[in-house]
Amino acid sequence: MLIRVLLVIEEPKLRQRLEGLFERPDVVVESPRGGKFLWERASRLSADVLIVQEDLIPAPVSESIAAQRALPESPWIVAMVREENAEVRARLLAAGCEAVLPASLGDAQLQAVFATVLAKRSELSVTRLREARPAARPSLNDFVSQSPAMQAFLGLVRKVAGSESTLLIAGETGVGKERLAQAVHHEGGRAQGPFVPVNCAALAESLLESELFGHEEGAFTGATRSRRGCFELAHRGTLFLDEIGEVPPHLQVKLLRALQEREIRRVGGEKGLPVDVRVMAATNRDLEGEVKAGRFRQDLYYRLSVVTLTIPPLRERREDIPTLAESYVRFLRARIGRDVRGIAPEVLEVLQNYTWPGNVRELINVIERAMLLCNGETITIADLPLSIGRPPAAVLHHGGNGNGQAHANVSEVPAEWLGKPLREVRQLIVEHYERAYLAGLLREERGRIGATAARAGIEPRSLYEKMRHYGLRKEDFKKKVS
């Protein structure tokens, strides 16, 4: 990530001298003006390292330094003193300064100390980013597959993983686009740098620009402090833009400029900041169709789609479902504290016959739900959701042979279905009843997403995606039940 240095220096000659010691592409130096309010002004600016004249730190010194260190960025503070004084040095170090340097030091000595401080701070910042997003480090070796379609796809991924090219990862909701992007990041030359994901659909338009590019203090109402954006955070690493098709037109222009010029400008800022970022974008939309419809810029699409990776949906690689399901049982066992060891063969058959509109994410949710409901060590049909484990009653009519087995009632099958292949009919059936099922739950829960998702055994985000797919709006279900 870009390292920001704040010079809280009132003396012009010293300030100019220090500015000349930080001519590095990954360091941004800012010298605010503020007179006697300079320290207060500095507290509203984002910084990793704050270099300050000792006599500008308000008394009590320990409390002022503690207040700076309590800011979100927790900047390191380097105090500049007029001359070496052991007592002053000890007092400032005890108050929380990272270093105390006399202004009488030569440029080479100061530059060596600053280089050490910046290197340590950069390492700490990357570590903090990783800790803020704790997760396993996915590898391309995790994507084990018996499916010819998936094997061919992974072969293409391995060819481009080590490059610096911009990637567009396409695929339906839930296929694992972010996980693939993480794996590509960890396989490439930027593995030691940060991986910074941004969900472009989860942020309001007014917030997305600030999230991506950062903002300066006072850039808009409520911007009481400056803030760095995800481009800065991802410096020397990877920026993953999920749901790129949701970016509004005016931000598409700014994003295109950032990709072309490798430079960004904060909201409310006047100068550009150079950034070294590999961008990966993901979408479940048809971006070519969006371009033709005029909703997505053609030049941005070409810039993003240097290489397009389209992940096959789960229904097109059914051979992988048993292996995936059993691996999720092993993975979730310790996490949810259930001693489930296996899956019954008939369950695996049902899972392979299901169309999985929510893809891998839906499979994970189904396995987790089944493990929570399972009474033994093996998942059975009874542990699956009704929409997966049992056939719809209107399509399969029970009875007629006296043994309780189901048989098809052809008179109830729409005539147009008979001209379609089985896989398409199966998907039509599942989607029809899944929509009706979710609409029924939403109606009973009066549009409450959390409660509806809990009853369905899926995550709220998955429910939102299914609602968008089926054209369901929570507002339509908020009326009181009569």
Image: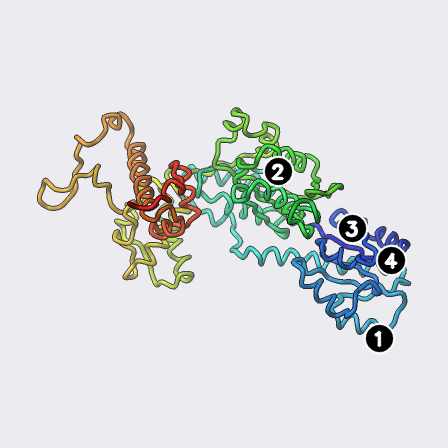
- Decide which of tag 3 and tag 4 comes sooner along the chain: 3
Who is closer to the viewer here, 133 or 376? 133
For the residues marked 2 and 1, what is the alpha-carbon distance in whole angstroms? 54 Å
- Decide which of tag 2 and tag 1 comes sooner along the chain: 1
Q: Is 144 left, or right, of 392 in this rendering?
A: right
Residue 306, located in which quarter of the rendered image? top right
Label 3 Cα neighbours within 10 Å, binned few <14 / some 14-19 / many ≥20: some
For the residues marked 3 and 4, what is the alpha-carbon distance in whole angstroms? 21 Å
Q: Position of residue 455 (x, y in %)?
A: 33, 52
Label 3–label 1 contact, CB within 8 A: no
Q: Amino acid at mark 2?
A: Ser
Q: Which residue is mark 4?
A: 108
* Residue at image location 59% in from the left, 44% down from the top: 207
Marker disc for residue 30: 3
- Decide which of tag 3 and tag 2 comes sooner along the chain: 3
Q: Amino acid at mark 1?
A: Glu
Q: Position of residue 40 (x, y in %)?
A: 75, 58
Under circle 1, the secondary element is: helix
